[in-house]
Amino acid sequence: MKAGDKVSPERMDDSFLLAYARRMGEAKEHAGRVTPEYVLEHVQNMESLIREAHDQGFTVLAEFRQAVHQFQAELLMRTMQPDLIAEIPRESITDEDVRTFYEENIGMYGLPDIYAATVFHTLDEGEAGLLGAADGRAALDAEADVLPGVEVLTLDPMPLERFPGVWAQTLLSLETGECGPVVMHEDRFAVLCLEEARTNRTQDFEHRKEYIRNDVLYSRYRQAWREAYEHLREKHGVEIDPEAAERFRERMEEEREG
């Protein structure tokens, strides 16, 4: 078609229109409505949008060119995947493969450190002073027994970020069994004692094995795509002009700093 031509069904290749219909039939937003008339109207609407965007100069904008470039590449990636990447059967990944991946990527399977604590707290500044002067846990327990405003709260183990900030800082400074100084949180004075700290925890291998098997599968596909892209870049001689690449780096740095 030439600019200014009317868009009509007769001027569009029937295979192109059928491809549109098949794609629309797979989309939820068109479910139950994909008749020939519906497709023909949709195609003409899309063509109208494209022409209007061209008339307004959108097609020369960097943002527009980038979006089209990325969409086209992602669509082709999905379409060409069977030709570029051999299918990797999930059952081809052995338990030994899974164990090795788990051990080599143990950081992926870490669990947050958790802390258990006992908190002695009061609203009374005088009682807080007596708690702060107590020498050790036994002395704190004794003071709590006789001071009417002191409440003792045993907290279940939980990640550090769930504690108020000043409490978290205190717990990080303590060894198991130690008690810290008096700290203030909102309107209360508190003394914290660290009961337990579970650190360097990881997810149980046996419990997570099948999820880890999926991670192995994804990692193999990622590697296969890296190799496929390296081959395609070499085959088609795709590279960015070094001067353009350097200008790009400089402009990105300027945007970060700006």
Image (cartoon, rainbow, N blue to C red):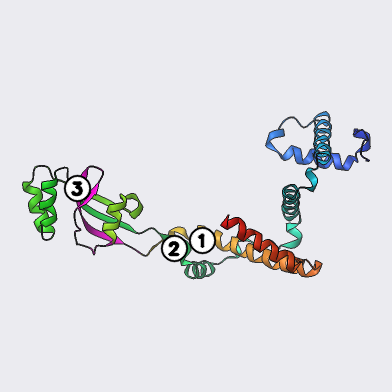
Q: Which residue is mark 1?
A: 212
Check if residue 181 falls in the magenta segment. yes
Q: Is residue 60 visible?
A: yes
Residue 205 has which mark?
2
How many labels were placed on the picture?
A: 3
The residue drawn where x is 76% and y is 60% is 83
Q: Amino acid at mark 1?
A: Ile
Q: Amino acid at mark 3?
A: Phe
Q: Give neighbour class at mark 1: few <14, some 14-19, many 20+ (Cα, 10 Å).
A: many
Is residue 88 among what the camera can see?
no
Q: Which residues are magenta?
A: 173-199
How far apart are labels 1 and 3 at the CA level?
46 Å
Q: Position of residue 51 (x, y in %)?
A: 84, 38
Residue 155 magenta-highlighted: no
Camera-side residue: 69 or 205? 69
User: Element under label 2?
Assistant: helix
- Residue at image point 71% right, 62% down: 85
Q: Position of residue 254 (x, y in %)?
A: 61, 58
- Residue 189, numbered circle: 3
Who's the residue at 55% across and 67% down the image? 94
What's the amino acid at mark 2?
Answer: Phe
